[in-house]
């Protein structure tokens, strides 16, 4: 891959199947945690990351071809998200900056049951941290 960027995927985007749709050359780096962010949902039911000191939202870290950035930005803009950079940490490494698409100022809404179920299934399939899985299940209450 000639030129690429680190991307933190969260919500239903964490799976290999989803990232291969973005670009078949996306390379999974492994599970990761968004430092000082938590998973939330928009009024339209989109998974979002909101700043929250001390929190850590689970997701996956990817190496994405730079040629995919424009399409990813257009998809994110349709959800009302913008590109940003956050720090993430993987179980085996230090904090690193990664690109993310989210709206850190969006109001938070309860997740639709079907969307939450898809996010939980995605998190389980990628073997994300069990504490994060418990947090997801608590969102249903």
Image: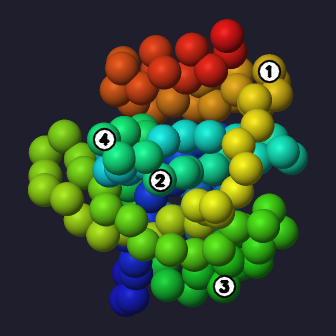
- Which mark sits nearer the N-terminus, 3 or 4? 4
- Mark 4, secondary structure of its residue: strand
Residue at horizontal 42%, vertical 72%?
Answer: 85
**Which residue is more in the foreground, 52 or 6?**
52
Tally of numbered tags? 4
User: Is residue 87 at least partly visible in the picture?
Assistant: yes
Q: To which residue does mark 3 refer?
A: 70
Dots 4 and 1: beta carbons under 8 Å?
no
Q: To which residue does mark 4 refer?
A: 54
Residue at horizontal 39%, vertical 88%?
Answer: 3
- Which mark sits nearer the N-terminus, 2 or 3? 2
Front position among marks 2 and 1: 2
- Tell me: 28 left or right of 81: left
- Tell me: 83 left or right of 92: right
On screen, residue 45 above or below 136: below
Residue at horizontal 75%, vertical 30%?
Answer: 111
Front position among marks 4 and 1: 4
- Mark 3, secondary structure of its residue: helix
Q: To which residue does mark 1 refer?
A: 113
Spatial CA span between label 1 and label 3: 31 Å
Dots 3 and 4: beta carbons under 8 Å?
no
């Amino acid at each position: 891959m000639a030129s690429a960027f680190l991307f933190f995927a969260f919500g239903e985007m964490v799976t290999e199947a989803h990232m291969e749709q973005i670009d078949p050359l996306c390379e999974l780096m492994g599970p990761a945690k968004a430092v000082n962010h938590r998973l939330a949902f928009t009024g339209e039911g989109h998974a979002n990351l909101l700043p929250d000191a001390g929190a850590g939202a689970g997701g996956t870290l990817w190496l994405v071809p730079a040629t995919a950035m424009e399409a990813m930005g257009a998809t994110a803009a349709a959800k009302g998200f913008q590109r940003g950079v956050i720090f993430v940490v993987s179980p085996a490494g230090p904090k690193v900056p990664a690109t993310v698409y989210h709206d850190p100022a969006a109001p938070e809404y309860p997740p639709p049951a079907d969307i939450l179920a898809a996010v939980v299934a995605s998190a389980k399939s990628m073997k994300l941290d069990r504490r994060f899985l418990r947090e997801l299940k608590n969102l249903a209450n």
